């Protein structure tokens, strides 16, 4: 089964370079790497990984289905509270090397997907 990596960045040249870099890497041979526009890619993607520009964060469905599998790219300052509340744990500058972005994508792939069942608070009284 192919794993999905969706890349949606405002810097189209960087996005294209990242797609080509991942497609050439044998680590991603069992992955479908998709580059595109927000309207095409920002819908729910199951257990796949999203690499998105911070500008597209407001366009993502709320709540995020799998926020731990989202890698956020930014070129400047970020509202960390908004990012934290959305559940995203990976934030990189778009000046980072492609190798760093690859490592963030691999880490996101290894994170468990969101469970379909809400977790009960262990300390909640019955």
Image (spheres, rainbow, N blue to C red):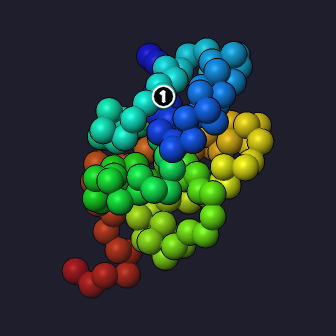
Q: Count of labels shown?
A: 1
Quadrant holding the N terminus:
top left
> Left or right of 54: which side holds 23?
right
| Residue 116 percent across, percent down from the top left | 28, 48
Viewer-nearest residue: 123 or 26: 26
Q: Secondary structure at mark 1?
A: strand
**Residue tagged 1:** 35
| Residue 82 percent across, percent down from the top left | 44, 71
Q: Residues within 10 Å of mark 1 (few under 14, many from 20)?
A: many
**Residue at x-position 77% and y-position 42%:** 97
> Left or right of 94: which side holds 111?
left
| Residue 43 percent across, percent down from the top left | 29, 40
**Residue at x-position 43% and y-position 44%:** 113
**Residue 63 seen from this side:** yes
> Left or right of 30: which side holds 17?
right
Q: Is residue 26 above or below residue 76?
A: above
| Residue 2 percent across, percent down from the top left | 46, 18
**Residue at x-position 71% and y-position 19%:** 25
**Residue 109 seen from this side:** no
Viewer-nearest residue: 124 or 94: 94
């Amino acid at each position: 089964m192919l794993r999905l990596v969706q890349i949606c960045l405002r810097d189209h040249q960087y996005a294209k370079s990242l797609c080509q870099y991942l497609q050439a890497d044998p680590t991603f041979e069992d992955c479908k790497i998709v580059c595109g526009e927000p309207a095409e890619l920002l819908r729910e993607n199951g257990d796949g990984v999203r690499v998105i520009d911070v500008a597209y964060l407001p366009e993502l469905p709320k709540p995020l289905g799998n926020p731990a599998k989202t890698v956020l790219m930014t070129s400047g300052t970020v509202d960390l509270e908004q990012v934290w509340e959305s559940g995203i744990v990976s934030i990189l500058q778009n000046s980072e090397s492609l190798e760093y972005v690859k490592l963030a994508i691999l880490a996101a792939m290894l994170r468990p997907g969101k469970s379909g069942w809400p977790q009960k608070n262990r300390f909640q009284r019955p």
